[in-house]
Amino acid sequence: MDTRIELSLENTGDGEGDAWPDPNGTGRGAPPVVVALSGPLSLTTARPLVERLCQAMRGYGAVVADLSRVELVHSGAVHAFPEAAARAGEWPEVRLALAAPDATTAALLESSRVTERVPVHPDVDAALAHLDERPALVRGWWRFGVDPRAPGDARTNVRRVCGYWSVDEDAREAAEIVVTELVTNAVEHAASRSVVEVERREHRLRLTVRDFDLAPLPEAHLPAPTSPRGRGLAMVAAVTTSWGVEAHRDGKTVWAEMTTA
């Protein structure tokens, strides 16, 4: 039998009144937990809800949030669900689905694009039955310091999620090359910490590396043969379908995209 936990949204911030999973839960492979939400879903209650759902996913692995007794106070609060899924970990190590029998709520979840990241079903039984199906958009992200081990750690993480998400071998190898080159650049040339994000959507794999270096942006084209720098960017250009650089006030993001089956 699936575990069912009652969670009042009015109590999510005080930690009282609701049974809750052991934080040392059994994780992936354990039976899913159904979190039956009740009360007002507002911008105020959404913040602690993210933390509680993260805790449940990390403890149980798979969670269905039952919204049948939720009163939607603010439409923007529905983004608590994809935020919780993103913060808890990578699919399928953590999985979240919503049961939304109310047609208006289900339509809002669709129009807000929540359904891309967190599947929505008309009832709990349907949500449980489809928990193992990959969402339309899956994402993983990691932070790295200025550490010579960072490129290898980033490559390992990308390889792992590509395996989870059934990314074909050519795209996986390209993604490993890209993340290695870009994180190496952040560590060795920018002397900066970095944030790596990778997402899979339909037949596209997108990878970004954000650093906090204020030096001029690299040129978004192949370097001249005599250039002492840019060999890594040449490799990025060679193995991707498109790539580029976005400037920020405190650094830059280099992005790259690859096609996948």
Image (spheres, rainbow, N blue to C red):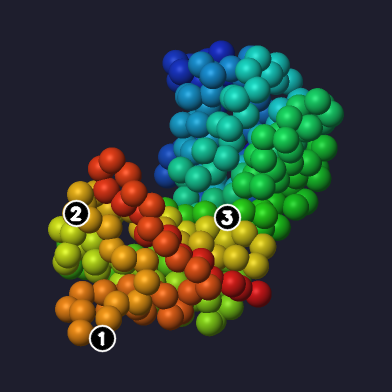
Question: Is residue 253 shown left or right of residue 144?
Answer: right
The residue carrying mark 1 is 225
Residue 215's mark?
2
Percent of width and height locating residue 155: 36, 70
Amino acid type of disc 1?
A: Pro
Q: How far apart are marks 2 and 1 (CA)?
A: 22 Å
Residue 179 numbered tag: none
Residue topped by disc 3: 138
For the point 24% across and 68% down, which residue is it?
Answer: 184
Image quarter of the N terminus: top right
In percent of width and height, residue 176 lies at 40, 74
N-terminal label among 2 and 1: 2
**Measuring 65% from the left and 67% from the top, which residue is drawn there?**
203
Q: Which of 225 and 160 is in front in this view?
A: 225
CA separation in Å, label 2 and label 3 = 32 Å
Are the residues flagged by discs 1 and 3 in contact, CB closer than 8 Å?
Answer: no
Q: Where is residue 116 in the image (x, y as percent from the top left)?
A: 66, 47
How packed mark 1 is, by other alpha carbons closer than 10 Å (few <14, some 14-19, many 20 or more), is: few
3D distance between C-alphas at marks 1 and 3 = 38 Å
Residue 245: where, in percent of width, then height? 38, 58
Do we see residue 12 in this rendering? Answer: yes
